[in-house]
Image: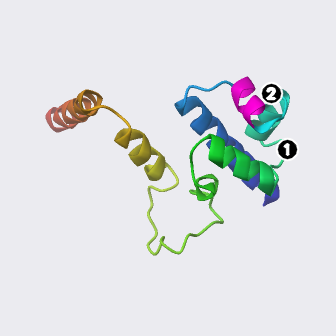
């Protein structure tokens, strides 16, 4: 299970880093490690200590639970129902990201979704 979690955490770290437009070097400098260490975290080669996880969550502006979300062996008390889509999408990430967009950006995304729905209906 530890190896699976390290890989999961690494994917979440990479996704958040990229969504903020940060380099591995920038993240490494913020938590006082080498960029190679960030690479190892992202690949799941090395585990992340609790103190490093706290530093990462603070620098990346996410709660620590962000790194546990969507992990198959982690169940939050708020997760009372099984969602078959939860393995495919990180809804909290999408929601948080969408909320940071400008009104114009949101409208463009919604228009793309509307167009996609129209195409599906017409075949």
Residue at the (55%, 70%) spot, across then down: 76
Q: Nearer the viewer, residue 8 or 67?
A: 67
Direction from residue 13 to residue 98 in the image, left or right: left
Instruction: Classify 90 as above or below 114.
Output: below
**Residue 116 visible somewhere in the drawing:** yes
**Residue 89 visible somewhere in the drawing:** no
Mark 1 in CB contact with mark 2 (< 8 angstroms): no
Stretch of the chain drawn in magenta? 24-30
Residue at the (71%, 52%) spot, across then down: 54
Residue 92 location in percent, x, y? 45, 52
Instruction: Classify 57 as above or below 113.
Output: below
Local SS, label 1: loop
Q: Is residue 29 magenta?
A: yes
Instruction: Classify 94 as above or below 29.
Output: below
| Count of labels in the image | 2
Magenta stretch, main secondary structure class: helix
| Circle on res. 46 | 1
Residue at the (70%, 26%) spot, across then down: 26
Residue 77 location in percent, x, y? 53, 75
Direction from residue 89 to residue 64 in the image, left or right: right
Front: mark 1 or 2: 2
Residue 12 location in percent, x, y? 62, 44
Neighbor class of circle 2 (other Cα within 10 Å; few <14, some 14-19, many 20+) is some
Residue 123 location in percent, x, y? 19, 32
| Circle on res. 35 | 2
Instruction: Classify 64 as above or below 77.
Output: above
Direction from residue 27 to residue 15 in the image, left or right: left
Q: Nearer the viewer, residue 109 or 30?
A: 30
């Amino acid at each position: 299970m530890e190896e699976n979690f390290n890989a999961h955490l690494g994917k979440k770290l990479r996704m958040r880093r990229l969504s903020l437009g940060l380099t591995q070097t920038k993240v490494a400098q913020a938590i006082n490690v080498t960029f190679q260490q960030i690479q190892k975290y992202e690949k799941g080669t090395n585990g992340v200590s609790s103190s490093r996880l706290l530093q990462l969550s603070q620098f990346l502006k996410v709660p620590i639970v962000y790194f546990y979300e969507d992990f198959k062996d982690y169940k939050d008390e708020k997760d009372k129902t099984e969602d078959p889509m939860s393995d495919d999408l990180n809804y909290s990430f999408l929601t948080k990201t969408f909320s940071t967009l400008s009104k114009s950006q949101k409208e463009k995304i919604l228009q793309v979704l509307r167009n996609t729905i129209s195409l599906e209906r017409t075949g």
